[in-house]
Amino acid sequence: MRIIYLFILSFILFPLSADDHKVKPGGEVGEFHYIKAKNPLAIVAATDKFIASDCGQKWQAKSRGLVLMQLDGSGMSHFFYSGFDDYESMNEAIQLASSCAAGLQFVQAIGDASHGEYYFNRIGELSLQKGDWTKDSVFLKYDLFVDPMKRGDYAKAWSSLVESQDTPGSSGLVTHVTGNGRVSHFAFNGGPSIPELMSGSEDTFSSKEFLEFAAEVDEYRTVVNVMMVTPVKAWVKE
């Protein structure tokens, strides 16, 4: 079951090379739908029903996958991530789901099982990635705001830091395309377990490279919030 759920945080577009320490372009776009659940079991059941429908199968054929993630450290309880190769695939999937009965029923069921007044969504691009996502079972997610004029500098500094660290899991940098007024990016790193994730993070924070990174980006980067993210269930095409 672990492999089924963790295969697919849906960010991987191509096989990873033997050098997992190099930062690479992510090359994927996705939708992030944040919810505050009243009934998580009903949310999973509603998603199962949609994916099993004819419309859901057609939607899934256009996507990289759909994953439900649990959040700790946020006012929201979960988010759905749906990944796509490109904006064309995303557009086709959105049009399909919004024009079929099963898609509309799915949206209604999620609304009934969550606090609708707290829902929000973003579109994001996986700008950079390092490591093998399939080996990670827990993540730290850092919501960031980066000065628009310094975003290229931040990506370069982040890449240098990440490549300098021998951490047990993966890392990534997502750029928000919409919903980016308060949070322009999020960075994340993963690990096989909470103790290993925390130990790796502590090692990074105490390193000389992190001190240099923090001094470089401090004037133009704000950490808005830090969350722990745990995969609940993934739905992927076979």
Image (cartoon, helix red, strand yellow):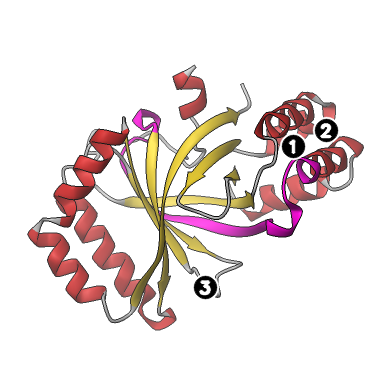
Q: Which residue shows up at 68% across the image and 29% down it?
A: 41
Q: In this view, does 32 lie to the left or right of 202?
A: right
Q: In this view, does 128 lie to the left or right of 165?
A: right
SS state under label 3: loop
Circle 2: residue type: Cys
Q: Is residue 238 magenta?
A: no
Q: Which of marks 2 and 3 is in front?
A: 3
Question: Residue, x 10% and y 56% (percent of image)?
Answer: 207
Asked if the residues shown at circle 3 and circle 1 are in contact, with their CB atoms under 8 angstroms apart, the answer is no
Position of residue 230 measured from the top left corner of the image (x, y, whole percent) = 46, 37
Q: Residue 59 carries which label?
A: 1
Extent of the magenta region: 110-137
Q: Is residue 130 magenta?
A: yes
Q: Closer to the camera, 223 or 94? A: 223
CB contact under 8 Å: marks 1 and 2 = yes
Density class for disc 2 (Cα within 10 Å; few <14, some 14-19, many ≥20) is: some
Nearer to me, 81 or 206: 206
Residue 225 visible from this viewpoint:
yes
Residue at the image point whose x is 45% and y is 64% from the top: 185
Up/down of 67 relative to 153, above or below = above
Q: Where is residue 13 in the image (x, y as percent from the top left)?
A: 47, 40
C-alpha separation, residue under disc 3 versus residue under disc 1 = 31 Å
**Residue 182, which numbered label?**
3
Closer to the camera in the image, 237 or 201: 201
Near mark 1 (Cα within 10 A), the count class, few <14, some 14-19 or many ≥20, is: many
Q: Is residue 124 above or below residue 233?
A: below
Q: Name the residue under label 2.
A: 55
Q: Which of marks 3 and 1 is nearer the N terminus?
A: 1
Q: Is mark 1 on a helix, strand or loop?
A: helix
Q: Is 42 on the left or on the right of 32, as rendered?
A: right
Residue 108 placed where, x, y %?
A: 84, 43
